[in-house]
Every structure is written in C-alpha cells, then in structure tokens.
Image: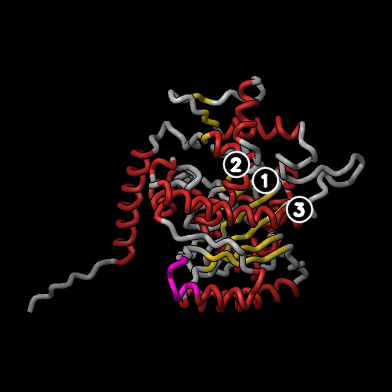
Amino acid sequence: MEDFFVQEDLNTVIREHSEMLATQLHAQGESLFPPDASKTMRKFTSGEAAAMLGVNDSYLRKLHLEGRGPSPELTPGNRRLYSVQDIKELRELLEKTARKPGDYLPGRRLAPEGSDQKYIDRMQVIGVMNFKGGSGKTTSSAHLAQRLALLGYRVLAIDLDPQASLTALHGVQPEYDLTDGGTLYDAIRYDDPAPISTVIRKTYIPGLDLIPGNLELMEFEHETPRALAQGNAGLFFFRVKEALSQVDSDYDVVVIDCPPQLGFLTMSALSAATGVLVTIHPEMLDVMSMSQFLRMTADLMDVIAESGADMKHDWMRYLLTRYEPTDAPQNRIVAFLRTMYGEKVLNAPMLKSTAISDAGLTKQTLYEVERSAFTRSTYDRAIESLNAVNDEIAALIQATWGRK
C-alpha cells in the first residue's frame, strides 16, 4: 500500500511559512504606506478640535478671525480643519491666558525654584496587561497613549510585547525597520546596555513618542535566567524602572503594552509601573483565565517584594473590553465583577465595535481614521466609548497628582 503522507521537517515548514507571510505583509504595507511615505495624522474638524481643547467651537472661530494662533485649513465649504500641530499650538496659546495652570496643558507641574526635583508630580507609568491574548490589551494601550497626547500630555508608548502590534499600529514594521535592534531590550540588556534615548522614536502625533518592539525582546526572557544563575542579574526587575529614570523629565505619562504572559519582562514592567490597567473581556473563559493570572501575579510580586522592591502602586483598575451591552451573559459577568471589585472596575467599558476592528485592518486607531469611513452612528458610538475610557484614566492621573 502506498504511503500517502510524506513527512516534512517542521522547522523548515515554519520558516517557509514565516517568510511567505512576512513578504505578503510587507507588500500589503507598501501598498498602504509606500517606502518613501510615513504615517500622518488626519486633520480634525473645528468641533473635534474644540472638544479636545475643552472650549467652544465659537471661541476657536473667534481666535481664527482675530488672527491669533495657527491658521486652520479651509475647505471649499468654508469648514475649518485643524492639524495635530495646530491643536498643540492652540493649547500653548490658551495656557498663557488660562485661569489656572494646567487647564490646557495638563501634565506635571514644575517644582518651585531651588527644589531638588524638577516636577512636583511624579511621572505616571501605566502597565497595561493581561495573561490572555485577545483581551484588547494592545488596542487599549494604543488608544490611551494617543488620546493622552491629543489632550496635551507628553507621552511615551513602549511596546514590550514581542508580537509588536502596538509598533505596527504606529507605522513601524518590526521585521523590516528593526533589523538591528531598536527596542527596549537595547536599554535593559545585561551586557553593555544603551541609553534609552537611543531607542525612542518620534511619532506623527506631537507629544507622543514610541519605543517599538519585536522578537528581540524575547532575549531578555532567555538571558535573565542565565544571568541569575551566574549571579550577574542583580535586581533584574528594576531594569525597566532604571531605564525610564533616564528620561523622567521628558514625559508626563508612560504607557507600557506588556506581553500576554507573566515573564521577566512583565515583572520588570510591574516594578516600574505606578498604575496598572488589567483588560478583561467579560466572557467566562476569560474571567477564569484572569483568576489564574491574578493569583500568579500576586505570588510573583511577593517574591519581588521579598527581594527589596517597593510594589506599592498609585492605582489598579480593570477595564472591560469588547463589551456588548445587549449580550445577557456578558451583562451578568459585568455585574458579578462590579459587585466583587467595586470602583476597581472602570465605570466606562470599551464597547465592541466594527469601527475599531476595521480601523485595525489598515493598521490605524479610531483616532486616525476619517469619520466618513463609517456610518455616523457606528463611529460616534465607538469614539464616545473610547474617549470615556481614556478620559476616566486621565482623571485618575490627575487625582494621583492631587488635582481634580
């Protein structure tokens, strides 16, 4: 009888498939964003710009007519469109005449002259994490970082996930643009770490910088056990915190998209974090997985604390993601979680939306796509949900700094 099955070398098959997929993804990326092009942020209507600035549209019109601030683009229908740079300049203009400091530039306050510190408020480092993939972790991280930057914060987004989805969303192709390092691993490695400033990239959004990720981050997971065995790792869990201390005066908020497992990268990010955001998809299997995640996290944090780390955080919150209000089983789980954890669950959930997923197909966030790409009700529902989540987190940051 003939043998219908020919055995294949698994390593060869995986490598071939990897190269095929990478080539196709690169071709698709070039069709969307040619090699000589870079991602840009769309322009915002006067209503959107006014909402971000916290002023009336009529006031923006008045500033324009008086020739104060940047000149917006005028459409054939005489509508005003503002770029992200225009909005940044308007913030700086409005801050000069604000009733109190921080009304339009909400970042850290400068310390009085003669103080040992530059700022009164400490830099907020938000670790976004979950043990299970598909919980909306990267989507939440990307939209949070962009929203905070659009609101006037100085933000550093760090992709600590070797899968590098946050990186791809910001126009960097890990397999082509990061062939010679360029991730946080360069700054936290055990042999000859580089200054963290060497791996920080500007993005197309003023106030938002990025440290991209790729598979190279896995080297930290492999090197740490070896360094520990040789007695060279020291306090490995402080490595992210020590790297961030080099740019403490440059940012108000750092958003870290953590890998979906409890490895050395996640533990080091937890040690650096001042706030922790745990994403939860309100399905029973995901909640059961989260139970294991929390138990393992607590055990690991105990070990780290025994080694001398201060594991106190300013806040920890659960974010409900991909939530469908009409789904009865989901509503039961949401009620269960709110009863159990109370205010630890953010009031605003991130709704499941085709607008968010469709934007992701073109490596964009919802803040980047044109409203006209969707039906008005679909877009408005999704953007209101995202803004509610991110503004609630912004309020937590302000509360941490002792401000309303």
Locate residue 346, reporting x and y percent: 61, 64
Left or right relative to 330: residue 222: right
In three-dimensional space, the C-alpha distance between marks 1 and 2, rounded to whole angstroms, equals: 38 Å
Which residue in the structure is indicated by mark 2? 51
The image position of residue 192, as x and y in percent, is 65, 51
Q: Residue furthest left?
A: 1
- Residue at 44%, 49% (x, y): give it: 379
Task: Say which amino acid is labelled 1.
Answer: Pro
In 3D space, how far apart are the residues under numbered discs 2 and 3 (Cα atoms)?
Answer: 19 Å
Which segment did they paint magenta?
325-331
Q: Is residue 200 visible?
A: yes
The residue lying toward the viewer, choosing from 200 and 251, is 251
Residue position marked by numbered label 1 in the rendering: 195
Q: Which mark is residue 178?
A: none
Query: Eyeballing the image, is 70 above or below 149?
Result: above
The residue shown at (58%, 47%) is: 147
320 or 134: nearer the viewer? 320
274 within the magenta span? no
Quadrant position of residue 345: bottom right
The residue drawn where x is 43% and y is 70% is 327
Q: Secondary structure at mark 3?
A: loop
Q: Which of these two is toward me, 30 or 275?
A: 275
- Image coords of residue 172 (percent x, y): 48, 44
Which x, y percent locates residue 84?
A: 57, 35
Residue that carries the numbered disc 3 in the rendered image:
404
Colouring:
secondary structure
Question: Does residue 114 lie above or below 22 as drawn?
Answer: above
On the rendered structure, is 258 left or right of 342? left
Disc 3 residue type (three-letter): Lys
